[in-house]
Image: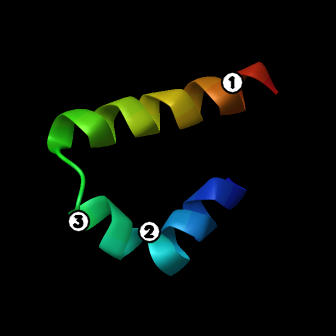
Amino acid sequence: MEWLLLIGSYGRDFLNRQTDEELERLYNLQIKGMNKE
C-alpha cells in the first residue's frame, strides 16, 4: 500500500499528464506487483 501514499504525495501532477489507458496500465502493474508479494 506504500505506492498509494507515493502516488498521493506527488502523483497528482504526474497522473494528470497520463491518458486513461496509461493510468489503467500503471495501476494494473502496481496491483500485480502487490499480489506477487
Q: Earlier in the sequence, mark 3 or mark 1?
A: 3
Q: How is the image coloured?
A: rainbow
Mark 3, mark 1: which one is toward the viewer? Answer: 3
Residue depicted at x 70% and y 59%: 2
Q: Where residue 35 is drawn, which disc sits there?
A: 1
Residue found at the very far right of the displayed protein: 37
Asked if the residue under mark 1 is in contact with the one under mark 3, i.e. CB atoms within 8 Å, the reply is no
Residue depicted at x 17% and y 42%: 20
Kind of residue sitting beneath label 1: Asn
- 33 displayed left or right of 13: right
Mark 2, mark 1: which one is toward the viewer? Answer: 2
Task: Read off the residue under disc 2.
Answer: 11
Above or below, comparing residue 2 to residue 5 in the picture: above
Q: Earlier in the sequence, mark 2 or mark 3?
A: 2
Above or below, comparing residue 15 to residue 23 in the picture: below
Kind of residue sitting beneath label 2: Gly
Kind of residue sitting beneath label 3: Asn
The C terminus lies in quadrant: top right
Query: For the residue labelled by badge 3, is the local secondary structure a helix, a strand or a loop?
Result: helix
User: Residue 27: x, y in percent?
Assistant: 43, 38
